[in-house]
Amino acid sequence: MGILDRFSLKDRIALITAGAGPLFGSSLTEALAEAGATVITASRNLEANLEYAEKLRSQGFDAHGMQLDIGDPESIDRLHDELIERFGRLDILVNSALARDGHAGGGFEEQTPEQWEKAASGDFAGLFHICRAFLPDMRKQGRGSIINISSIYGVVSNDPSLYTGTTMKQPPTYNFVKAGMINFTRHLACYYGRDGVRANCISPGGYFNGQPEAFVERYCERVPVGRMLENEDIQGAVVFLASDASSYVTGENLMVDGGWTCH
Ligand SMILES: NC(=O)c1ccc[n+]([C@@H]2O[C@H](COP(=O)([O-])OP(=O)(O)OC[C@H]3O[C@@H](n4cnc5c(N)ncnc54)[C@H](O)[C@@H]3O)[C@@H](O)[C@H]2O)c1
């Protein structure tokens, strides 16, 4: 098999949580679909996922929308059962959903214990439940790739000087959840590698999303490639980790950060 064939996701079933989202979600989904996978996106708004899937189908991709509340274990179980019944298996699980309400409320001193609990029950417990739901299927079929979307802020702290003069907040729940995700991924890699299941993280840098000019300028000055992340930047990483091109890569945290964490 040639190297480009090893990147192919033909006949693979992929679930991307929040895969219809306008920022990273849809970039991840479209990359996997273009590489040949059947893609399923799922988040709270079923309508939005169904509409997005229809749009992708009209472009010739095999796409489906389902419902998921990552903070609700019953919703995860329902998604699992329905997906396995409809598609028979899951080869690729991309955990991109972020329950942002757990990260609201500002900086450390402004955040409340309730927000920490929300972040823990939404993102932390959600990751645990969804991996636990699909892991037995992947082990049984002897093949699976789990890709968790972490962040530069799971590896390093935010730099306070970037935010001077803006109203942007940096909730530490985010650092807590994203850092935990990276080492949880290594745990999965170590314990399930012999079953054919690989687990990796992607840690993207900052995406331009209408942030204040002063922040964007400082960010671009600091990052070695001199710009914020764009949709296409993340796509090669997810196809690589999902496919057989990365068959000996597991437990890795692939930085897609333009060199942010190099200095
Ligand atoms: N935007 C960035 O600069 C950046 C940088 C590094 C990492 N990331 C990570 O990328 C991933 C995607 O984030 P994004 O930037 O596209 O932002 P986003 O806020 O658009 O993504 C969050 C997505 O999660 C979904 N969601 C929220 N609550 C949910 C719930 N309870 N159940 C299911 N889905 C839920 C939303 O519908 C949304 O599509 C996140 O994990 C985020 O931490 C983003």
Image: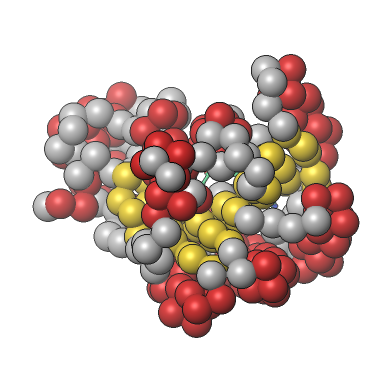
From the viewer's side, name the closer residue of 25 and 81.
81
- Residue 110 in percent (x, y) is at 47, 60
**In the rendered image, which quarter is residue 237 located in?**
top left
Determine if residue 70 is in view. Answer: yes
Residue 81 screen position, x and y as percent: 85, 62
Quadrant for residue 157, please give it. bottom left
Query: Which of the 4 image quarters holds residue 131?
Result: bottom right
Which quadrant of the rendered structure holds the N terminus?
top left
Q: Please give left or right for residue 225 compared with residue 58 in the image.
A: left
What's the coloring here?
secondary structure
Image side of residue 119 versus residue 254, left or right: right
Q: Position of residue 21 (x, y in %)?
A: 61, 35
Specify the farthest residue to the front.
1
**159 relative position to 202: left or right:** left
Q: Residue furthest top?
A: 58
Residue 259 image point, x, y percent: 20, 44
